[in-house]
Image: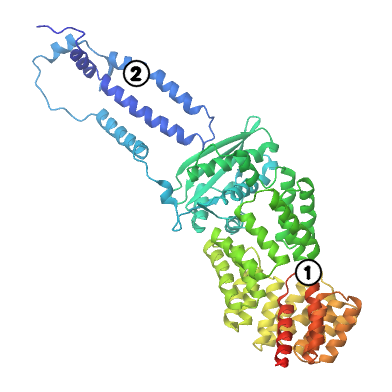
Amino acid sequence: MTHKPDNPTTFWQELKRRKVVRVIALYAAAAYVIIELSNNVVQPLNLPEWTPTLIIVLIVIGFPFAVIFSWIFDVTPEGIKKTASAKVAGQKKTGSIPRKRKLRVSDALIAGLVILVVILAYPKVFPKDRMDQMKAADGKITLAVMPFQNMTNDTLWDVWELGIQNELIVYLSNSPILSVRQLESVSSIMQLTADFQYTALTPSVASSISQKLNANVFIFGNIIEAGEKIRLNAQLMDAKTEEIFQSFQLECKSEEGLLDVVDSLSLLVSNFLEVSSIDRDLTHAKTVSSTTKSPQAYRYWVHGWNAFVKRDFPGACGWLLQSFEIDSSYFGALWLLSMAYLNQGMYEEGKKWCLKIQDLKDHLPLSMKQELLTKWTYSLYFETPKEGIKWLRQAIELDDQSTGSYFLLGVSYIELLQYHYAIPALEKALEIYQNWDTKPMWVYNYTDLGYAYHQTGQYKKEKQLYRKAIVDFPNDPAILYQQAILALTEGDSIVAEGFIHDYTTIQSDVYGWSEIRIHNALGRLFSEAKYFVQAEKEFRKALTLAPENTTILNSLAWMLIDHDIDLNEGLKLIDHALEIDPANYSYLDTKGWGLYKQGKYNEALKILQKAWELRPVYDHDVYMHIQEAEQTLASQDH
């Protein structure tokens, strides 16, 4: 009985004979691989967003042509030939001797494509819990944000390389499941190479930086021109494998709209990492994450920050005030202004800006990092180092790679004379820098630790520390000053003389110090080394040049009183200083301490209490003097 030509079995056999089934399988596998590859390269190569769609359309259009071509033609060792009809093929097959089928190239090709499809599809069919793998021991995802590379060839956008990075850090630090490495940490490692350019930042370099920061995930992005628009590209990448596991792309028409786009990017990244609803309140996100909406305000802030880190505090204030004039709710400008005035000893002005931050906190939600900075700043002006230490420890819990938090913690303990607590904190900051293979941002990371070593008699450690410090900060007067004191303490006057010569030369020639200022500094140097005869000579030289200089009068008076050298002369000098500046709390403390040393406890306590009332910020020396005077008087009553 003959088979009907439309019999499904016969049709299926004909499809197999003409290798149509094989071609469909090959086409489907190849199409899947091409689509997956296109999705993965669009972002890195900055291809148009419609590229994957175009590829899919072309694949769909090509499918019927491939099927028709495979039905009509066949690829043979002799080339492409028209496939014979079933009847002709059957006649040729009659009488032929069956042979064992050989492995064909197409078989290997199909096998390879199948394996590739399995590799690409497996993670989607059986996805791993990537976020669990990214979590640290405390359950948080450790994240580093890289500077965004300016790929526009327009230097106007250079300032936003760090700007976008900072905005993302501020927002993401507010997440309870993220441990975000702060801007200082990332910048410090990049500074390892003096001539490092952001254009040299590759995923491999970013991966290396992230691993030094113990971050499992990093954000890598760039700024590019897309016609008349500006496009932000960002990728979440595995720090170990450099694999991109999520990409983001947003656009704005001008610089004015950039911060809104950055806010949206922050929200998208946060939502993805927190696996939360994408319908979160965008308005609240913008309020929390954006430190300013004004590009010009941010530009002024950058100039202010650069001046601040160079210890040009007056210059920093000038830039930051301009930033504040543009945006009065800019947290970054307010906070840095309070710090710049503090470093100049302009406490009342600094307090004003500190209180502005408090007022801002009541009207504008802040990130956790900003909240802690606000509380710590307030403690500097209105509380004690004990409250500040509490906030710094919380900051360390938020980011255990924050060298700044460890440094400030150590400084706080030094102020309380608790050197055994200060040393581990300061050592930890240096350890982190060492792990990053970069030098500290401040010379004070070395000198403050050296001071703590000196106060605890660890001179060998102190000397070794300065050897490393002078490599990172060659010819820095702060290090030379400490080295001179150490050499004098160890009795090596020849070595000390060399350090003193270099110190005075640099201060005079490089920083333009006057002779008066240099003599006063040398007086303090010899006094700290307990070379009181030389110290008094230097102070006297300074007073000869400026007899009404109250700072020098107080310095000499304090040394004479505190070390019981000449109480009467000390009190005479400090009385002269108080005639010129009667409301100076520091001078009152010197006089009160002198009277205490003379046994005039009641009079001393009254003056010390007055000094305490007039103090602009917490002063541990005054506090300790009052405690000692009160305890002495109490013991006399018993």
Residue situated in front as seen by the camera: 312 or 323: 323
* Proximity of marks 2 and 1: CB atoms separated by less than 8 Å: no
Residue situated in front as seen by the camera: 448 or 161: 448
What residue lies at 50% left-to-right and 39% top-to-bottom? 277
Asked whether residue 75 is in view, the answer is no
Q: Earlier in the sequence, mark 2 or mark 1?
A: 2
The relative height of residue 297 versus residue 622 in the rendered view (above or below) is: above
Residue situated in front as seen by the camera: 380 or 94: 380
Amino acid type indicated by mark 2: Ala
Does residue 614 appear left or right of residue 104 in this picture?
right
Residue situated in front as seen by the camera: 367 or 28: 367
The relative height of residue 413 versus residue 379 in the rendered view (above or below) is: below
Image location (x, y in percent) of residue 31: 38, 27
The relative height of residue 486 versus residue 381 in the rendered view (above or below) is: below
Say which quarter of the image contains residue 627.
bottom right
Image location (x, y in percent) of residue 88: 17, 9
Residue annotated with mark 1: 616
Asked whether residue 38 is in view, the answer is yes
What residue lies at 76% left-to-right and 53% top-to-bottom? 320
Image location (x, y in percent) of residue 376: 66, 62
Amino acid type indicated by mark 1: Pro
What residue lies at 30% left-to-right and 36% top-to-bottom? 115
Residue annotated with mark 2: 66
Location of the C terminus by quadrant is bottom right
Frontmost of labels 2 and 1 is: 1
